[in-house]
Image: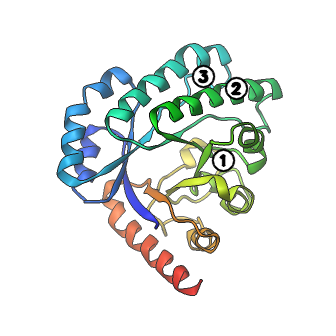
Amino acid sequence: MITIGGRAHNMEEIVTVSKFGYPTLEISLDDPAVVSGWIPQLLEIKNTYGTAFLAHYPNEDNPFDLEVLRDKFLPRIKALMEISEQLDIRKATIHFWMDNRWAPADLIRGKIELLSRIVNYGNQYGITVCIENLTERPESFGPAFEAIPELRMTLDIGHAQLLAKQNTSFRFTEDCFPRIAHMHVHDNRGGTSVKDDLHLALGEGSVDYAAIIKSLVNKGYDSTITMEVKPQDMSRTKQTLEDCIRNFQNLS
C-alpha cells in the first residue's frame, strides 16, 4: 500500500505538519547534540498523532574528502541512527553523492566502502538506508547497488528533472525499480543548479509527475512517498497524488 506523508526540516515544522495527521513524517536529523534534545517532544508527537517518523540525514561534510567522511560524517550518522532507534524510525534517506560524470573512480570506490559501513550501521539499528538521487543517473548508482545488496533508494522526482533532457525518474524506474523503497515528490521547471530545485507543489512546474507515478504503479510500487513541498502546499499535492494513484491502480 502506498503511504503519503509530509516533510519537516526543523522542530517548528515538525509541530506544524504533525497536526495535519499524515501517517508518516520525514524529519531532518542533522546535529546529534541538537536532535537528542528533541526526543521527549518527538515521542509526545508520535504518541499524540500516531505518526511514524522517517529520517532524512544531513548532507555530507565534504563529498570529495574520504578522510572527512570517514572521521566526521560516519560517526555523526551512527549517532543519529542511535537516536533514530529511540524514535522507532525504520527508514532513512541519505545524500551520498557519487555521480560518475564528475567524481573520480577512486573516490567512488572509497565512498562505496563507506556507504557499506553506513548500511551496516542501519542493519544494527533496524533502519533501511535509502540513497537519494541528486545529479546521479542509474549507472552512477550501479556499482553501489552491486556491492551493497541491502542498499535501497529514495527516488526524488524533482531532482531527476534537473540537469537532464528527460526526467531521469523513468530510467531509475526501469533500471533500479527493486531498489526503490521511498520517493520524494515536488515540482520545478528544470535547470542546472541548486537554485532551480524549487520544491513547488505538483502541477506548478514541468515535472511529468503523472507519467512517473503511472510507471511506478504499473511496476507495483507500494511503499512510502514524502511530499517535499511547503506545508501550505501539502494538502493539494496530496490530493493530486491520490488522484493519480487511484486512476492508474484502477487501470492496472
Q: Which amino acid lies under the numbered mark 2 shown in the image of this protein?
A: Glu
- Judging depth in this view, the residue of 164 and 41 nearest the camera is 41
Q: Residue furthest bottom?
A: 251
Image quarter of residue 158:
bottom right
- Classed neighbour count for the residue bearing mark 2: other residues with Cα under 10 Å, few (<14), some (14–19), many (≥20): some
Q: Which residue is mark 2?
A: 113
Looking at the image, is mark 2 or mark 3 nearer the viewer? 2
- Judging depth in this view, the residue of 155 and 43 nearest the camera is 43
Q: Are marks 2 and 3 in contact (CB under 8 Å)?
A: no
Residue 173: image location, x then y, percent? 68, 61
Distance, label 1 to label 3, CA atoms, is 21 Å
The label shown at residue 172 is none
Q: Which amino acid lies under the numbered mark 1 shown in the image of this protein?
A: Thr
**Image point (20%, 37%), residue name:** 41
- Locate the C terminus by quadrant: bottom right
Q: Are marks 1 and 3 in contact (CB under 8 Å)?
A: no
The label shown at residue 62 is 3
Q: Are marks 2 and 1 in contact (CB under 8 Å)?
A: no
The label shown at residue 192 is 1
- Judging depth in this view, the residue of 36 and 117 nearest the camera is 117
Vertical placement of residue 108 versus 5, above or below: above
- Classed neighbour count for the residue bearing mark 3: other residues with Cα under 10 Å, few (<14), some (14–19), many (≥20): few
Looking at the image, tell me whether mark 2 or mark 1 is earlier in sequence order.
Answer: 2
